[in-house]
Each structure stands twice: as C-alpha cells, then as structure tokens.
Image (spheres, rainbow, N blue to C red):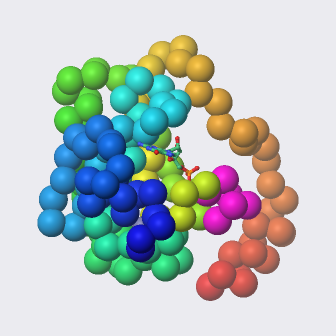
C-alpha cells in the first residue's frame, strides 16, 4: 500500500530501527516506546487489522513476536512481556497495517493499561459465550 507508514518502513522508504526480519515479517522499534525495548512486528504483506490478516501471515507474526521476545529476554532482561494488538480505532488502533506490540515489562515501569478488572455477571458471560459459540 503506497500510503501506508509501515509498508514504507518495510520497503526502506521511511526510516525505522529494524531489529529482526524473515520471509514474512519485519520487526522494528516503536517510535514512542511504552517501555524501553517496545517494538512492533508486522507482516510484509499489507493487511489492515486482525480481521483482515490471513491466518498464515498472523502465524508468522506470532512466531516472530515470540522469537523477538526471547531475544529481548536475553539482552534486556525484563521482568515480563505484554503482546498487544489493537483492532480498529475503538480498540486504540492508530496505524492501519496489522502490528503486534512486543512490550518488555520492568518492575515498577510506568505502563498502565486502561483496564480495571472486576467480576462479571455469570449470566451475562454465559449468554455472550453462547452467542459466540
Ligand atoms: P497502534 O496505536 O495502532 O496500536 O500502534 C501504532 C504504533 O505505531 C504506536 O505505538 C506508535 O508509537 C507507532 N508509530 C507511529 N508512527 C511511527 C513511526 O513513524 N515509526 C515507528 N517506528 N513507529 C511509529
Ligand atoms: Zn501497509
């Protein structure tokens, strides 16, 4: 896609700190890191989001994200990781080329996700589960 930021980084037309790549994926540092090491893994083949990406491309991204997390685990020694994908603006997506955030976590780091877990209604959970099934 000619006007896509991440296609531009993959093509080398837009600068990016590329840290890993394979036949189907490229990984590069996020320009606004949530924590030190925050990176993005993208498929080379443009797909807008989780619903559009083909399963084999998603599989390649997941495998690359695991490889990257393992590498970060060795060299950055974080306390843990979050893998995050946002699909559509309602879920905070801002760049419409599928990407998996790989976010190393450190004890006491400042990252807060806007999600306050609280108990759900059993009946409501069951009814939604039935709809999905
Ligand atoms: P989203 O909000 O769609 O889940 O994530 C998009 C991510 O892309 C954000 O974390 C943002 O910081 C990152 N980003 C936006 N523009 C650029 C850029 O030009 N270069 C890089 N490396 N990352 C970018
Ligand atoms: Zn793209």
Q: Residue at x 79, y 47 (%)?
A: 119
Residue 113 seen in render: yes
x and y percentages locating residue 65 in the rendered image: 31, 50
x and y percentages locating residue 33 in the rendered image: 48, 31
In the rendered image, the quadrant that contains the N terminus is bottom left
Q: Residue at x 59, y 64 (%)?
A: 87
User: Which residue is at the front of the view, 131 or 70?
Assistant: 70
The part of the chain drawn in magenta is: 88-93
Q: Across the whole image, how many numbered discs are drawn on residues?
A: 0
- Is 89 a magenta residue? yes
x and y percentages locating residue 107 in the rendered image: 48, 16
- Ligand 2 falls in quadrant: bottom left
Q: Identify whether 33 is placed above or below 59.
A: above
User: Which residue is at the front of the view, 97 or 62?
Assistant: 97
x and y percentages locating residue 75 in the rendered image: 21, 23
Q: Residue at x 71, y 82 (%)?
A: 130
Residue 81 seen in render: no
Q: Identify whether 62 is placed above or below 30.
A: below
Q: Residue most toward the left? A: 23
């Amino acid at each position: 896609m000619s006007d896509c930021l991440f296609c531009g980084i993959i093509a080398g037309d837009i600068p990016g700190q590329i840290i890993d790549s394979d036949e189907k994926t490229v990984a590069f540092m996020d320009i606004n890191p949530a924590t030190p090491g925050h990176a993005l893994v993208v498929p080379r083949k443009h797909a807008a989001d989780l619903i559009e990406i083909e399963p084999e491309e998603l599989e390649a991204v997941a495998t690359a994200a695991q490889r990257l997390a393992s590498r970060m685990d060795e060299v950055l020694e974080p306390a843990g990781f979050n893998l995050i994908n946002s699909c559509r603006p309602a879920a905070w997506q801002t760049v419409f080329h599928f990407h998996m955030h790989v976010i190393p976590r450190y004890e006491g780091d400042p990252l807060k996700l806007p999600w306050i877990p609280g108990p759900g209604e059993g009946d409501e959970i069951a009814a939604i589960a039935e709809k999905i099934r």
